[in-house]
Structures are given as structure tokens and as C-alpha cells.
Amino acid sequence: KQIEGMAERLAEMRMLMAQRGGHILEALMPYVKKLAQVGYFRSCLSTGELVLLRSRDGECRPESDEAESAGRVQDAVRSMKVFLDQDDLGKKDPMALQTIRNFSAINEIANDIHSTRLLLKEQGHPKFQDSDENITLPDSSPEVIQDISAQTRGLLDFWKKILSVTLKNQPRLSMLNRIQLARLLLLCDSLVGAPQTSYCNHLMPYIMICFPELSAACNQNKGRSIKLMDDVEKASDAVFNVKREGQSLDVQKLLLVLERWISVVGNLIGQMDLPKHSLDRAIPVMTQVIDATD
């Protein structure tokens, strides 16, 4: 009954819009055409928002470009959807119909891209934490932006796959939440090929999270704690003090570096004869995140 009622109200709305359609379309078309020419979306992971901006000179300068009102954009999109269902519009003004159809499709795809980028951040991808990205509007058709959407979805699928393998190989990493995992990966990226005076200053907080049994043991025996830090320093140097290839490692190589490092640290800690810590409560933390969109 609710669906039938909504359908009836939608039909009434379309009829009302059809009566006033000439005036509304006349006002809507310049706005849509202008956005198609100079507008672009900006996916802001730092705020979680997708913003539509107007370029002042054809270049994307989000710091100074004018942002469109989210309410106005949504009103325009709703109006477009009404016009898309009017068969007579295609006969009267096929160019207007095509412009509306393209912008409506691009708006939907841009929202899909933004949602996928938010999922990549949520699932701990180090390249998608607080990064922002411009999504330009192709004048003619949505195919170009559709390719970007497919690529972004592919990145998400690939990340889920390789992360699940890493967590299976090194369950201790499941002790980290998604933000901690991303930060650790970014830290590893900065350490590779850049010798540090003290790796432990950077890495010890993550070691304590992944190996919670260490905390009590180190507090009880300061000498053991000092020896462990010396051993971790040497082991970390062997992992990170290597020749770097490129400015930034790809995520698959980063995960391999992280696997190697946590394995070396785990072997060192295993020699300390500490009480075994159950991972039963930790493993589902990241598994739940990975399965969030399945």
C-alpha cells in the first residue's frame, strides 16, 4: 500500500510539473549546462562530504572555487528525474533531454565513487585516509567518469583481497583497528629506505597493541624491556633499511613489508617465554570491516 501511495503521489507530482514544465525547464537548463561546463565534484575523505564546485577559470582550485549549495543541487537532481520520465520532452527538445540525462547519470556515478572511496578509508587503505580528489564533469557523456568508478571499485576489491591474505598470514595485525592499520602502513612506507636513529620510538606503540602480553612483562622487568627494544631496533633496521624503489610503495608491497616486520618481531617476542595471548577476540575486528560490503 505504501508503494502504491508513493506511485500515486509521484504521478501527481509529474502531472503538476508537466503543467509548469516549460518554466521549470527554462530555469533549470542554464544551471545544468553551466555546471556541465565548469563544475566538478570533490570527494573529501577528511570531512566525508562530496562537494560540487564551480571552476572560475577552467582550472580546479577547490580552495577558492565557489561551492554549490547541497540543497540546490539535490533540488535540481530531483527536478531532472521528473523530466527524464516525460516522453514528450525528448520530442520537443532532445538536446535538453540528453543534457539532463547525462548530468543526472554523472551525479549518480560521482556519488558511487565517493561512497567507494569512503569504504576504502573505512577498511584501512593507507592511500585513502584523509585524501581529497577532484572528479571532473565530462561535457558530453558519463563514460569517462564511469571508468573512474570502475577503477575505484576495483581498488576496493583488490584491497579486500590482499588485506584478508595479510591478516590470515599474520593474525597479530588483527589487533589493530582500521585507523591504526592505515597509520602503521603509512609509517612503514616512510621508514623503508630512510634509516632512522630509533625505529622503536615510532613502532613500539603498535607492537604493544599487537602483543598486549608484552605490557605487563616489560613493566615487571625493565632489563627485559631494554633488551627487547634493542632487538626490535636491530630487526627493524634489517627490514626497513633497504634500497627504496620509487617515492611511494604500492599497497601490496607495503603489506608484504608489514608482514615481514611483524613476523620478525613475533619471533623475538616468542623467545621471551611469555603467556600466550588469545586472538579470538581480535580477529573479527578486521574481518568484520572487510566483509562490510559483501
Image (tube, helix red, strand yellow):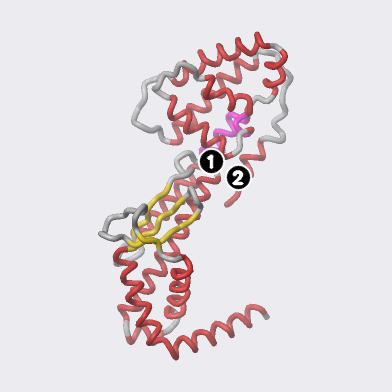
Q: Name the residue tied to disc 2.
A: 289
Callout 2, which amino acid? Val
Residue closest to the eye, 195 or 61: 61
Q: Name the residue tied to disc 1.
A: 124
Q: Which residues are magenta?
A: 162-174
Residue closest to the eye, 149 or 49: 49
Residue closest to the eye, 270 or 132: 132
Answer above or below: position of 190 versus 115: above
Classify mark 2: residues with Cα within 10 Å, few (<14), some (14-19) or many (20+).
some
Report x, y in % for residue 12.
Answer: 54, 87
Answer above or below: position of 232 versus 3: above
Q: Earlier in the sequence, mark 1 or mark 2?
A: 1
Report x, y in % for residue 13.
Answer: 52, 84
What residue sits 43% from the left and 73% below the top?
Answer: 76
Kindly report the distance in space between the C-alpha atoms of the residues bearing marks 1 and 2.
Answer: 9 Å
Occupied quadrant, residue 246: top left
Indicate yes or no whether the magenta region holds residue 163. Answer: yes
What residue sits 53% from the left and 43% below the top?
Answer: 160
Report x, y in % for residue 201.
Answer: 53, 21
What residue sits 48% from the left and 27% below the top?
Answer: 257
Residue closest to the eye, 246 or 155: 246
Residue 176 can be seen in this image: yes
With 44 as the anchor, is 29 left or right in this view? Answer: left
What residue sits 32% from the left and 80% below the top?
Answer: 94
